[in-house]
Amino acid sequence: MITETEIKKGLAGVVVDYTAVSKVNPDTNSLLYRGYPVQDLAAGKSFEEVALLLWNGELPSQIELTEFIATERAGRALDAGVKAAIDLLPLDCHPMDVGRTAVSVIGARHALANDSSREAELIKAKELFAAFPAVVAYDQRRRRGLDIVEPREDLDYSQNFLWMTFGEEAVPDVVDAFRVSMVLYAEHSFNASTFTARVITSTLSDLHSAVTGAIGALKGPLHGGANEAVMHTFHEIGIDKDESREDAAARAKAWMEDALAAKKKVMGFGHRVYKHGDSRVPTMKAALDRMIEHYGRHEMLGLYDGLEAAMDEAKGIKPNLDYPAGPTYHLMGFDTEMFTPLFIASRIVGWTAHIMEQRASNALIRPLSAYNGPEQRSF
Ligand code: ACO
């Protein structure tokens, strides 16, 4: 007989396996990728270097990095079959559905789809890393009635991502804020989508199936969908470019007080693991601050501060990474519904690192349940 106290709803507090990919320490608000503090990586490394670190366990040598950059740049164009599949999808479907479908199609068309050797998995992971930005960029453009923009091999990952999306070269500050978001979103131990990828891998299924399933888990607003939901909150409060920072903060504060009085869950706040603040927020908030300065949008800072202060005062709950990331992507010019697909582009790295780790010391993930339905009966 299993008692109520033995049931760990949501697997809260349950340790299910080892991982060497990242370490989340809620006591010190710290996050290490393969031993390196994420804020140090965000300050001094390209997203391409961080990807190699997460996959291989060590930062790349110059030769490894140069090789990877060449492969990545050569693999950026949107595959004709994937484009044809995207074109079948209605413009009013959610962009996460487009991302999920695209990965599934890429898998179905891949010659190594069912080869689970580490070499093949790494090839597929790198290809997905290179190919996914074109999916997001094309989807963003087709929703605006714009033609596809071909990738450019003279640009780095972040520069090219913004180029393919907006059809113009982004200025260095914007590129850097985008790079920071990619580094911060890349990995976070056994979160819901990564765990989903590991569950699927544990059945000896293939990498693209695991990533496709992970995207499904990421879509929900309790996980990755929160960056989109944050922006819906900002819009519900109302964004007025001409409003002062102070007035915007006062309106945001009042909105939050009403929301909490109505017992609403406000997206972008709280975390299953961090209870005193998300380790990634200060770095992402600094990037948001730079974007607010760059675009001269101080009313956005007012909304941000007002919500944060009111939540802290009422419940002591801190923002998570999605809170500063949402308005950052908004200022860069992405449609709100595209925010979570941007999260996919980055988290592909973490998911595939975990898929390879799971594969290397696999055990089928299959927990137990306590049955509370009717006793045996006959019809
Ligand atoms: N708004 C209002 N209240 C909240 C919030 C929130 N965002 N988060 C937690 N609380 C409250 C709950 O209502 C609950 O209060 P109660 O004890 O009075 O009922 C208490 O804090 C504990 O909350 P739980 O949901 O039980 O805590 P859990 O650890 O399961 O939740 C979660 C973590 C799901 C992330 C939660 O904080 C939440 O729903 N946040 C909003 C969604 C979000 O931003 N998700 C992004 C996660 S980070 C990422 O994906 C990058």
Image: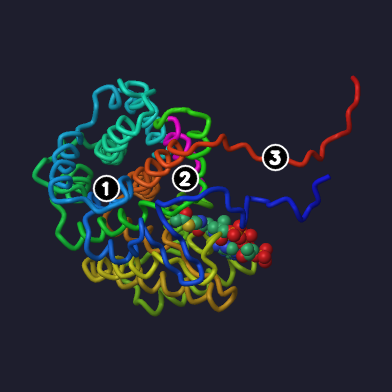
Q: Which mark is residue 280?
A: none
Q: Label 3 vs label 1: CA separation?
A: 36 Å
Q: Residues within 10 Å of mark 2 (few under 14, many from 20)?
A: many
Q: Nearer the viewer, residue 315 or 196?
A: 196
What kind of residue is marked 3? Leu
Q: Are marks 3 and 1 in contact (CB under 8 Å)?
A: no
Residue 278 image point, x, y percent: 45, 66
In the image, residue 218 lies in the stretch drawn in magenta: yes
Residue 71 image point, x, y percent: 17, 37
For label 3, the SS is loop
Give the labeled residue for mark 2: 194
Q: Is residue 49 visible?
A: yes
Q: Is residue 305 left or right of residue 2?
A: left
Which is more N-terminal, label 1 or label 2?
1
Question: Depth-wise, is mark 2 or mark 1 nearer the camera?
Answer: 1
In the image, residue 180 lies in the stretch drawn in magenta: no
Which is more N-terminal, label 3 or label 2?
2
Q: Quadrant of the N terminus?
A: top right
Q: Nearer the viewer, residue 102 or 185?
A: 185
Q: Label 2 vs label 1: CA separation?
A: 18 Å
Q: Label 2 vs label 3: CA separation?
A: 20 Å
Q: Residue at the spot x=31%, y=56% of the render?
A: 183
Give the labeled residue for mark 3: 368
Q: Which mark is residue 52?
A: 1
